Image (spheres, rainbow, N blue to C red):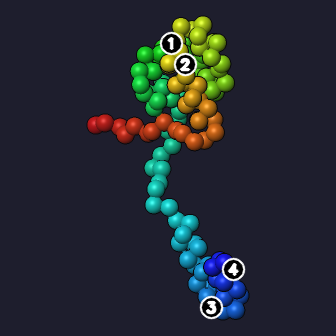
Amino acid sequence: MALRQILTWSKQLPSFSAQSSSISRVANFSSKSNPYIVKVGIPEFLNGVGRGLENHVVKLESEIGDLPKLLVTRTIKLKRLGIPCKDRKLILKYAHKYRLGLWRPRAQPVKS
């Protein structure tokens, strides 16, 4: 109801609509910024998940190869590689989130 009133007022007052367009430009500004985009491979992916999955990096890199293949890997292939059930569940859960764009591994700052 209030939105309708604002819209009708903006049609009646041309100066108000000019102000609202400048306000909308400010509202699109985001204070969160990504300083750099990290190239994500299997080690970065598993380190981002954490919880002990770092132990499987060598095995997954040698058998699967790269991240796009890991993202479409099924649980039976992970089971044949000898990865425990709990770790398979975590890998598949975060792979699904990554494919949907809901999760990305955090960028690790370079330690000097």
Callout 2 touching callout 1 (CB < 8 Å): yes
Residue 18's quadrant in the figure?
A: bottom right
**Position of the C terminus by quadrant:** top left
Query: In this view of the protein, can residue 41 be seen by the observer?
Result: yes
Image: 105 above or below 7: above
The picture places residue 22, in percent across and down from the top left corner, at 57, 78
Per the image, label 3 sits on a secondary structure element best described as helix
- Label 4 to label 1: alpha-carbon separation: 57 Å
Residue at 37% across, 40% down:
109
Question: For the residues marked 2 and 3, what is the alpha-carbon distance in whole angstroms?
Answer: 59 Å
Image quadrant in which the N terminus is located: bottom right
Amino acid identity at mark 1: Pro
Look at the numbered discs 2 and 3 and tell me whether their residues touch, using CB distance below 8 Å: no
Q: Using the image, tell me which numbered label, if any, was put on residue 84.
A: 1
| Rendered image quadrant of residue 61 | top right
Q: Quadrant of residue 78?
A: top right
- Say left or right for 73 vs 35: right
Residue receiving disc 2: 88
- Residue under label 3: 15
Question: Could you tell me residue 50's position as x and y percent?
Answer: 42, 27
Q: Is residue 81 above or below residue 11?
A: above
Residue plotted at (64% across, 39% down): 100
Secondary structure under badge 1? loop
In front: label 4 or label 3: 4
Q: CA distance from mark 3 to mark 1?
A: 65 Å
